Amino acid sequence: MLAQRWRTICALLFALLCIIFNWQWGVGVMFLLWAIRDIADGESRFIEKIKRSEELVLYVLVIFMQLFFALFFLVADFSKNDFLLWFL
């Protein structure tokens, strides 16, 4: 059973490492992967299932928020080193 869920186990370990080492970029990567998966599936699982074919406006809002959070966390971590300060 666990061998079939290797991606979930890796994601949980990665999330734990992000918390321990305060890697905000890791959270950004996870949001980006979440958005990519939702776009490919045509539905999002944010609190409840939102299908693109049934609720397009809400689906697009959720996807944009996921992409915004991904960009924010990716840029916020690197801005500590004076990299990409133009975004903030």
Image (cartoon, rainbow, N blue to C red):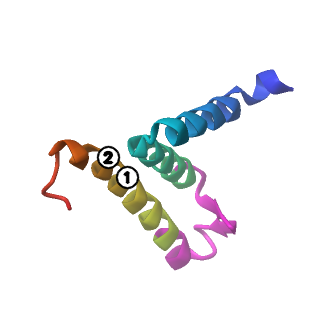
Residue 54 lies left or right of residue 74; in this view the side is right
Q: Which quadrant of the rendered structure holds the N terminus?
A: top right
* Mark drawn on residue 73: 1
Front residue (pair 15, 60): 15
Secondary structure type for disc 1: helix
Residue at image location 40% in from the left, 53% down from the top: 70
Magenta residues span 40-60
Horizontal and vertical percent for residue 10? 63, 29
Relative to 29, is 6 above or below?
A: above
Q: Quadrant of the C terminus?
A: bottom left
Residue 39 vertical position relative to residue 8 in the rendered view, above or below: below
In the drawing, does residue 54 fall left or right of residue 57? right
Task: Give the percent coordinates (x, y) of residue 85.
Answer: 15, 53
The single residue placed furthest to the right in the displayed view is 1
Residue at mark 2? 77
Q: Nearer the viewer, residue 14 or 68?
A: 14
- In the rendered structure, which amino acid carries the disc numbered 2? Asp
Compared to 65, does 29 lie above or below?
above
Q: Magenta span has 71?
A: no
Mark 1 and mark 2 residues within 8 Å of each other at the beta carbon:
yes
Q: Along the horizontal axis of the image, is 86 left or right of 71?
A: left
Q: Nearer the viewer, residue 16 or 54?
A: 16
Residue at 60% across, 51% down: 41
Q: Residue at x 32, y 46 (%)?
A: 77
Say above or below: 9 vs 85: above
Element type where label 2 sits in the image: helix
Residue 52, which numbered label? Answer: none
